[in-house]
Image (cartoon, helix red, strand yellow):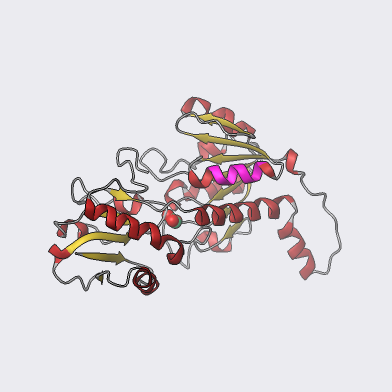
Amino acid sequence: MALLIVITGYQANPWVSKLQAFEPKLDIRVWPEVGDPDEIDFALTWRHPMGELKKYRNLKCIASMGAGVEHILCDPDLPHGVPITRIVEPSMSQSMSEYVIMVVLNYCRHNDLYRKQQIEKQWRVKIPIRARDLGIGIMGLGQLGGDAAKKLSHLGFQVAGWCRTPKMMNGVITYSGDNQLIEFLAHTRMLICLLPLTAGTKDILNLDLFNKLQRGAYLVNVARGEHLVEEDLLEALETGQLSGACLDVFRNEPLPEDHPFWRHPKIVITPHISSLTIPSAVVPQIIENYHRALSGNPLLNEVDVTQGY
Ligand code: GLV
């Protein structure tokens, strides 16, 4: 019985040490040093090489190291019938909400302008945007979007949320489905994307959608790079339909050095840090699921593969 870590683009070491500290007897293997593939019961993954997971015929669970699972579901060669889990963890929602609130407050208090003015030793006052005057629209009201919506609403912002199926939230105007999308966008001055990436949400941040926002709206993408049609963002910034964007996620990560986003004066970039998975915080739920998978008990945070999240 063994747990296999299959990770690309990041280090496995912090995971190994936290898993070992929590469960010293656990047999942990780190891909590609797998040993006997038939001994692997559980795979903890982040962007595994396509086709890799079907090599483990005793696999009982595929666990994402993060909140998203599209990096698993995009594998055309996934083993059939093996349940998939994701991380749901209050500290990750808190971290995402902190990032979103930081961007919203920077925007309302003209922080970028004051940083520039400081370099030029300029003392010029611009009236802040009052919270109650800013229409924030959050796409996706799941664990992350729901938490951000609630916290922004407590701060006094006019918050609306849009999701696939109808949802009620105190202090948040909610919209759902394709037929309410236009109304939701018309309300929105700052659009925050926190949708899961699925076939239905890929490329959703496109010119047609931007044109339905209030003129001069600001875009925040903290979900996945594939939600955004990059050329459409550049065009909307050029025409002034969008006044700026803050992006934490990109189609290609790390963002290639020659990408036009890097030097764009209206785009703020961060390197996919809005809500990092902290191994020590999530190891308990991974170990819990490891035991549940071995004993055939229902798993925590199992993904509905047909919905894609
Ligand atoms: C990060 O992007 C995650 O899915 O946790």
Classify residue 218 as left or right of residue 273. Answer: right
Which quadrant holds the N terminus?
bottom left
Q: Which residues are the magenta region?
A: 146-153
User: Dominant secondary structure of the magenta stretch?
Assistant: helix
Looking at the image, is 146 positioned above or below residue 166? below
Classify residue 113 as left or right of residue 153. Answer: right
Point out residue 8 in the picture as x, y percentages from the top left corner: 33, 66
Point out residue 115 in the picture as x, y percentages from the top left corner: 74, 64
At x 74%, y 39%, the residue is 132
Classify residue 86 as left or right of residue 268. Answer: left
Q: Quadrant of ligand 1?
A: bottom left
Looking at the image, is 95 positioned above or below residue 36? above
Residue 30 in sight: no
Which quadrant holds the C terminus?
top left
At x 82%, y 49%, the residue is 127
At x 55%, y 57%, the residue is 95
Which one is nearer the viewer's eye here, 25 or 109?
25
At x 65%, y 56%, the residue is 102
Looking at the image, is 31 positioned above or below residue 98? below
Count the labels in the image: 0
Which one is nearer the viewer's eye here, 294 or 113?
294
Which one is nearer the viewer's eye here, 261 or 38?
38
